Image (cartoon, rainbow, N blue to C red):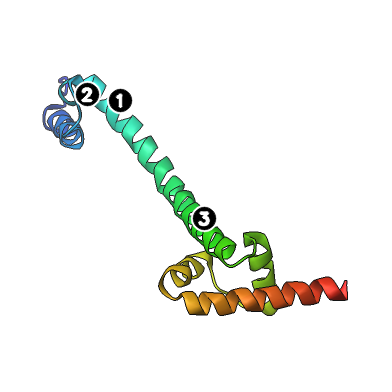
């Protein structure tokens, strides 16, 4: 039985690696072995950072809400607890948007949260 060489399949694999490594610096683009390692590493970073981005955005929302709460004389934790006690179910993204775009409505939310935290403290 004759020996089979991977002519077309090998060329396709190399072409795929070169296409994926386009834009990389130095020998990470030109050397097939370095390019393959760089592609694997880039894929790992991309996978990790897709999740990291969600954490960073949530932290940004919380920072914005905290700043808005402090301007109104309350703390983030008391504000969120007061909203939960009042039965107001708004996520942090929406609260952040309200703090920026509609300060009057955010003032009402803060006052509602303060009322509920003081009512809870009085009943305890």
Q: Name which residue lies at 35% across and 30% down.
A: 41
Secondary structure under tag 3 reads helix
> Which of the image's four quarters has the N terminus?
top left
Q: Is residue 36 left or right of residue 15?
A: right
Q: Position of residue 27 (x, y in %)?
A: 18, 20
In the image, which is nearer the foreground, mark 2 or mark 1?
2
**Residue 12, quarter of the rendered image:** top left
In the image, which is nearer the foreground, mark 3 or mark 1?
3
Residue farthest to the right, as pictured = 124
Q: Which residue is mark 2?
A: 28
Q: Is residue 97 above or below residue 104?
A: above
Q: Residues within 10 Å of mark 1 (few under 14, many from 20)?
A: few
Q: Is residue 123 left or right of residue 53?
A: right
Which is nearer the eye, 93 or 97? 97
Q: Name which residue lies at 16% across and 24% down.
A: 4
Q: Which residue is mark 3?
A: 63
> Which of the image's four quarters has the C terminus?
bottom right
Res 37 label: 1
Q: Is residue 62 left or right of residue 86?
A: left
Which is nearer the eye, 110 or 2? 110
Q: Name which residue lies at 49% across and 56% down.
A: 58
Secondary structure under tag 1 reads helix
Q: Is residue 21 above or below residue 108?
A: above
Which is nearer the eye, 66 or 10? 66
Res 113 label: none
Q: Is residue 122 above or below residue 2?
A: below
**Residue 24, quarter of the rendered image:** top left
Report the Cα–Cα distance between label 3 and label 1: 38 Å
Q: Is residue 104 left or right of residue 119?
A: left
Q: Mark 2 vs mark 1: which is more N-terminal?
A: 2
Q: Name which residue lies at 15% across and 36% down.
A: 19
Q: Mark 2 vs mark 3: which is more N-terminal?
A: 2
């Amino acid at each position: 039985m004759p020996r089979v060489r991977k002519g077309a399949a090998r060329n396709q694999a190399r072409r795929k690696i070169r296409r994926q490594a386009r834009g990389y610096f130095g020998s990470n683009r030109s050397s097939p072995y370095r390019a393959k390692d760089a592609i694997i590493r880039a894929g790992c970073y991309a996978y990790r950072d897709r999740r990291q981005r969600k954490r960073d955005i949530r932290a940004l929302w919380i920072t914005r809400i905290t700043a808005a709460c402090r301007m109104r004389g309350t703390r983030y934790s008391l504000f969120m607890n007061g909203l939960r006690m009042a039965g107001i179910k708004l996520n942090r993204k929406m609260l952040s948007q309200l703090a920026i775009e509609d300060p009057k409505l955010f003032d009402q939310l803060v006052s509602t949260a303060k009322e509920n935290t003081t009512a809870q403290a009085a009943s305890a």
